[in-house]
Image (tube, rainbow, N blue to C red):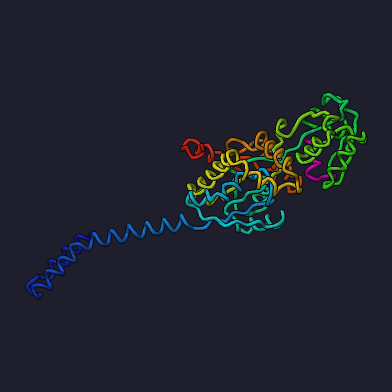
Amino acid sequence: MTLAALLDTQTASSPASHLPPRWGKARIGVLRVLPTMLLMIALLSAFSASAAAQSDTLRVFFYPPWNISKLPMYMARDAAIFERNGLKLSWTNPGSNDKLLAAIKNGEADIVVASANHIAHNNASGGPALRLVGNSGFNYSAFFADGTIKNAAELKGKKIGTGEPGSTPDQLTRLALRKLGIDPDKDVTLIPFDEGRNTDRVKALLGGSVAAMMITAETMYDMEKSGAIKKVTRLTDHRQLKIYAGGGADYAISAALLNSRRDDAKKFMSGICEGISLARKDQAKAKEFVAKTGRNMDAAGIDYLYKLYMADVIPAKPYLKPEGVDLALQMTSALLPAVAAMKPEQLTDAALVPELEKEGRCSF
């Protein structure tokens, strides 16, 4: 029986003759409007529940804390773009790779801004499922050779500078050589250097101890400033080789959040889209953040890095980079065999940013 029918029955079974005239009329009036009142209360309750769900704070974990590829995120956060989009966010820098992995495995993060390697490691080791949805850059490096060498084929038989065996720089140097058609184990001799001493590597290159090596953007500026860049040959760079690694600028969102609050996930990535645009428009503010990522660089160095990253690294739209996902699986599988069985589609939601584009929420 419907609520209205039940009320009619109750009214009919309580004849007005049994009641004082005024009281009976008042009760009948209340009973007539009660269905409308109950409906309004139900609608208000549903609206309140929905509003509460949308206002729940989303927990963002990011690491490493300062990297130029994260510039769109910093710009959007500083300009309160996420809040304007209706999001409440908490921000956590866990302080190390190990602490980041522990936090996301414990389910402490809704959104993770880090390297795709971290996401692959988490998903393969039993952590709450995360899905990569976008990217805003990578660590820029270029492959330089002795000035007498004019192409990659001339590297054969030479000594090549690299990082410590098994380190990320070592893996990326080997990958770059393979992409250039050079077998790193047969065609050349790899000479490892301490990962933190780029100046030693450059001295080795300029002094002839090695014939080629990958050089970071910061070191490229130092070489430009000193004129040493004229003594070497630039063979290629990570962008040309499609080696999209490092930078901690891969955006991952929990699978649960994508299923239950997909629009909030879109609001976050829409903020990244707007942050990219803002980084191009507000150069002064963008360079303030670039200054925090360098090693006490002068104004000219900051300008150099800003222009380089905006031109060659940070994309116009934060689309996923399939090559970066493949590389993350490849590199992580060496440390965690379970990753070898994973497919890129198990790690990604490649539809989210294209959906934003179609909805007009990634054009600023």
Q: Is residue 239 left or right of residue 144?
A: left
In this rendering, the answer to whether 331 lies above or below 15 is above
Q: Position of residue 247 (x, y in %)?
A: 69, 44
Q: Tell me the quarter of the picture where residue 151 sits.
A: top right
Query: Measuring 66% from the left and 56% from the top, which residue is drawn there?
Result: 93
Q: Is residue 346 left or right of residue 328?
A: left
Provide the major secondary structure of the magenta segment.
helix
In this rendering, the answer to whether 86 lies above or below 307 is below
How many marks overall?
0
Q: Tell me the quarter of the picture where residue 29 sits.
A: bottom left
On the question of residue 67 being in view, the answer is: yes
Give the residues in magenta. 164-175
345 falls in the magenta region:
no
Q: Position of residue 91 (x, y in %)?
A: 60, 56
Query: Measuring 75% from the left and 44% from the top, which residue is drawn there?
Result: 298
In this rendering, the answer to whether 346 lies above or below 48 is above
On the question of residue 327 being in view, the answer is: no
Query: Measuring 85% from the left and 33% from the top, which residue is drawn there?
Result: 212
Check the picture and name the quadrant holding the N terminus: bottom left
Q: Toward the viewer: 299 or 335?
A: 299
Q: Toward the viewer: 117 or 70?
A: 70
Q: Toward the viewer: 221 or 145?
A: 221
Specify the farthest residue to the left: 17
Q: Position of residue 38 (x, y in %)?
A: 27, 62
Q: Position of residue 312 (x, y in %)?
A: 67, 34
Q: Is residue 169 left or right of residue 10?
A: right
172 falls in the magenta region:
yes
